[in-house]
Image (cartoon, helix red, strand yellow):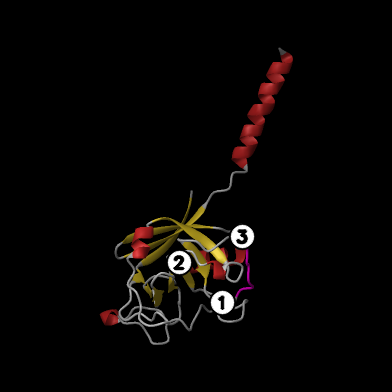
C-alpha cells in the first residue's frame, strides 16, 4: 500500500510539473475587412523573427498596412510598415514593398519547416539576412522557398479570407487599391 501511495504521488507531481512547463501558443490575428485571420506563431523555429512581428503588432505598426504584392497561386505579401500605409481613396505609395521598420534587419533563421498552403514567411531582399518587417502568406505549396526563407507561422483560421485578398497584376503582383490589415493583434492561449 505505501508503494501505491508513493507511485500515485509521483504521477501527480509529474502531471503538475508538465502543466507548469506547458508553453502557451502565441497567435497573430490580422483583422481584414472580410474578417480575422489567425496565425499560430512559431518562436521555436524563428525566435528573433517572431519577436519582431510581436513587437511591431503590439506597437500598432501593422495596422492599416497594404497587401502590396499578391500573386495568384503563390502568396500575399504585406508588412511594409514604412511605405505600406493605405492612404485616402485606398491607394498605397509606389514605394510599398521597399521599406521596413526602424529596427535593424534580422539574421536568417531558416528551418526544415516547408512552405505549404497557409505558411507565413518573412520577406527579404537578396541578402538572406535582410528580413525586417514584411511577411507573406502562402496560397499554395512552394518547395523552392524551403530552407531559403524564414518560416514564422501557420494560418490556423481564416484561410478563406486570405484566399479572398485582391490579386495583383503582372509578374510582380503589384496591387492597385489593395486590401489591407485593419488591425494586427497578438494573443496567447
Say above or below: 88 vs 29. Answer: below
Image position, residue 179 (x, y; %)? 33, 72
Q: CA distance from mark 2 to mark 3?
A: 17 Å
Image position, residue 181 (x, y; %)? 37, 69
Image position, residue 183 (x, y; %)? 37, 66
| Earlier sequence position, callout 2 versus callout 3 | 3
Q: Is residue 128 magenta?
A: no
User: In which quadrant is the N terminus drawn?
Assistant: top right
Residue marked by disc 2: 137
| Between 20 and 97, the one nearer to me in the picture | 97
Q: Residue at x 41, y 64 (%)?
A: 184
- Mark in front: 1 vs 2: 2
- Mark in front: 2 vs 3: 2
Q: Which mark is residue 45?
A: 3
Q: CA distance from mark 3 to mark 1?
A: 21 Å
Residue 158 position by quadrant: bottom left
| Earlier sequence position, callout 1 versus callout 2 | 1
* Secondary structure mostly taken by the magenta-highlighted segment of the chain: loop
Element class at badge 3 = loop
Image-based side of 147 in relation to 167, left or right: right
Residue marked by disc 1: 103
Amino acid at each position: 500500500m505505501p508503494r501505491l501511495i508513493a507511485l500515485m504521488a509521483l504521477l501527480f507531481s509529474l502531471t503538475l510539473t508538465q502543466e507548469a512547463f506547458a508553453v502557451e501558443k502565441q497567435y497573430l490575428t490580422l483583422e481584414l475587412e472580410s474578417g480575422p485571420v489567425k496565425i499560430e506563431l512559431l518562436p521555436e523555429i524563428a525566435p528573433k523573427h517572431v519577436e519582431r512581428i510581436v513587437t511591431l503588432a503590439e506597437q500598432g505598426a501593422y495596422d492599416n498596412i497594404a497587401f502590396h504584392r499578391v500573386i495568384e497561386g503563390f502568396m500575399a505579401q504585406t508588412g511594409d510598415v514604412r511605405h505600406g500605409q493605405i492612404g485616402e481613396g485606398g491607394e498605397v505609395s509606389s514605394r510599398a514593398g521597399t521599406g521596413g521598420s526602424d529596427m535593424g534587419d534580422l539574421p536568417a533563421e531558416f528551418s526544415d519547416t516547408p512552405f505549404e498552403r497557409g505558411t507565413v514567411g518573412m520577406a527579404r531582399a537578396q541578402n538572406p539576412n535582410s528580413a525586417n518587417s514584411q511577411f507573406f502568406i502562402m496560397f499554395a505549396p512552394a518547395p523552392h522557398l524551403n530552407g531559403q526563407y524564414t518560416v514564422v507561422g501557420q494560418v490556423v483560421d481564416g484561410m478563406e479570407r486570405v484566399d479572398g485578398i485582391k490579386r495583383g497584376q503582372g509578374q510582380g503582383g503589384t496591387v492597385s487599391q489593395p486590401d489591407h490589415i485593419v488591425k494586427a493583434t497578438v494573443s496567447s492561449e
